[in-house]
């Protein structure tokens, strides 16, 4: 347990941490001396055993964070065992891929509930915990790291539910960063590209393990940035979205006000054609949707 990143002693909750990227996050925090609540509805215990075997501290939480009470119990578990929560890493997610014309209500609801509600519910209960501590006069230095996706930033064919939920998570991140700053909380998001159960299902050839050399899509490549975002060095970084792929880290820049035309009165529909075409010609071309061909 090195503690080099400055997160030693921090109390960290990681959702969906039983395997894949979440597991790597939990192991990385523990390796830096943080105490970790490992959330997963299926396989939290195994990761806890790994952390403890390496000399770290961890406890398991196996309730679904896509429910209000399950999310509340995640925060309550950290507080009940270690007295507080310092870092929330929202990582849990599922896929129900389908073209919009074929998607069922259940497929839409399931993905939105786990991704978007799961992010909001844990964030809401953690925020209440930090507000109470701040009101009690405590100096709070807390961090939230949410998980969006390239699909949420640019869209992805066949993933309307997933892309919509992930796009909403970026907006939630930006709003929460402003609202929670008064309590000493930073809120950022990452858009990782890594080998997970979801990407192996959606793009198996792209994320396949290489025979030799740097494993670009190893899920552990994502975790160093997540650990850093929870460190004292990142206290001034909030409301931002970072893309992470292999050894590359970049800042994703979202919607901005573009070219504008103002008639000073109500437009007539017939006159808007040339106006809109001129605005589009002046604006940067949009990034293509993944899978659009």
Image (cartoon, rainbow, N blue to C red):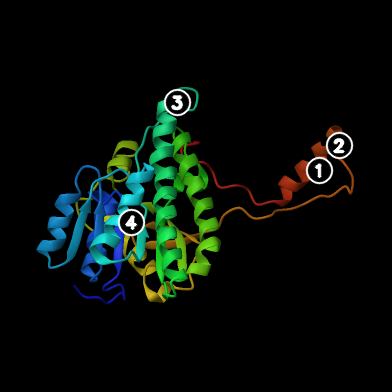
The numbered mark, 3 or 1, whose residue comes first in the sequence reads 3
Judging by the rendered image, the residue that carries numbered circle 2 is 271
The numbered mark, 1 or 4, whose residue comes first in the sequence reads 4
Judging by the rendered image, the residue that carries numbered circle 4 is 75
In the rendered image, residue 20, in percent from the top left (x then y), is placed at 26, 49
In the rendered image, residue 4, in percent from the top left (x then y), is placed at 27, 77
| Secondary structure category for the residue under label 3 | helix
| Secondary structure category for the residue under label 1 | helix
Judging by the rendered image, the residue that carries numbered circle 3 is 105
Residue that appears at 26% across and 74% down: 8
Q: Residues within 10 Å of mark 1 (few under 14, many from 20)?
A: few
Viewer-nearest of discs 1 and 4: 4
Direction from residue 86 to residue 252 in the image, left or right: right
Judging by the rendered image, the residue that carries numbered circle 1 is 275
The numbered mark, 2 or 4, whose residue comes first in the sequence reads 4
Residue that appears at 12% across and 65% down: 54
Residue that appears at 23% across and 62% down: 81
Q: CA distance from mark 1 to mark 4?
A: 52 Å
Q: Is residue 62 above or below residue 4?
A: above
Q: Is residue 19 above or below residue 183?
A: above
| Secondary structure category for the residue under label 4 | helix
Q: CA distance from mark 2 to mark 3?
A: 40 Å
In the rendered image, residue 193, in percent from the top left (x then y), is placed at 37, 51
Viewer-nearest of discs 2 and 4: 4
Front residue of 239 and 194: 239
The quarter of the picture where the N terminus appears is bottom left
Front residue of 215 and 233: 233
Direction from residue 288 to residue 211 in the image, left or right: left
């Amino acid at each position: 347990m090195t503690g080099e990143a400055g997160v030693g002693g921090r109390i960290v909750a990681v959702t969906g941490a039983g395997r894949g990227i979440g597991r790597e996050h939990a192991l990385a925090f523990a390796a830096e001396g943080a105490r970790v609540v490992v959330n997963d509805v299926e396989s939290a215990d195994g990761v806890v055993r790994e952390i403890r075997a390496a000399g770290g501290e961890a406890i398991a939480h196996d309730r679904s964070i896509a429910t209000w009470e399950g999310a509340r119990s995640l925060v309550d578990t950290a507080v009940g065992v270690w007295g507080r929560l310092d870092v929330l890493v929202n990582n849990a997610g599922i896929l129900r891929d389908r073209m919009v014309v074929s998607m069922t209500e259940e497929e839409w609801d399931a993905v939105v509930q786990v991704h978007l509600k799961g992010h909001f519910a844990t964030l809401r209960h953690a925020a209440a915990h930090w507000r109470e501590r701040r009101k009690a006069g405590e100096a709070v230095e807390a961090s939230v790291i949410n998980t969006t996706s390239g699909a949420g930033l640019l869209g992805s064919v066949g993933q309307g539910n997933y892309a919509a939920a992930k796009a909403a998570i970026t907006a939630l991140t930006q709003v929460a960063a402003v609202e929670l700053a008064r309590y000493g909380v930073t809120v950022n998001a990452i858009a990782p590209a890594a080998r997970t159960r979801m990407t192996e299902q959606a793009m198996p050839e792209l994320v396949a393990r290489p025979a030799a050399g740097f494993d670009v899509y190893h899920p552990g490549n994502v975790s160093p940035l997540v650990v850093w975002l929870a460190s004292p060095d990142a206290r001034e970084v909030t409301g931002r979205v970072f893309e992470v792929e292999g050894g590359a880290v970049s800042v994703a820049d979202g919607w901005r006000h573009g070219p504008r035309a103002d008639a000073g009165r109500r437009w007539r529909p017939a006159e808007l054609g040339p106006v809109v075409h001129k605005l589009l010609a002046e604006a940067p071309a949009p990034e293509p949707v993944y899978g659009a061909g």
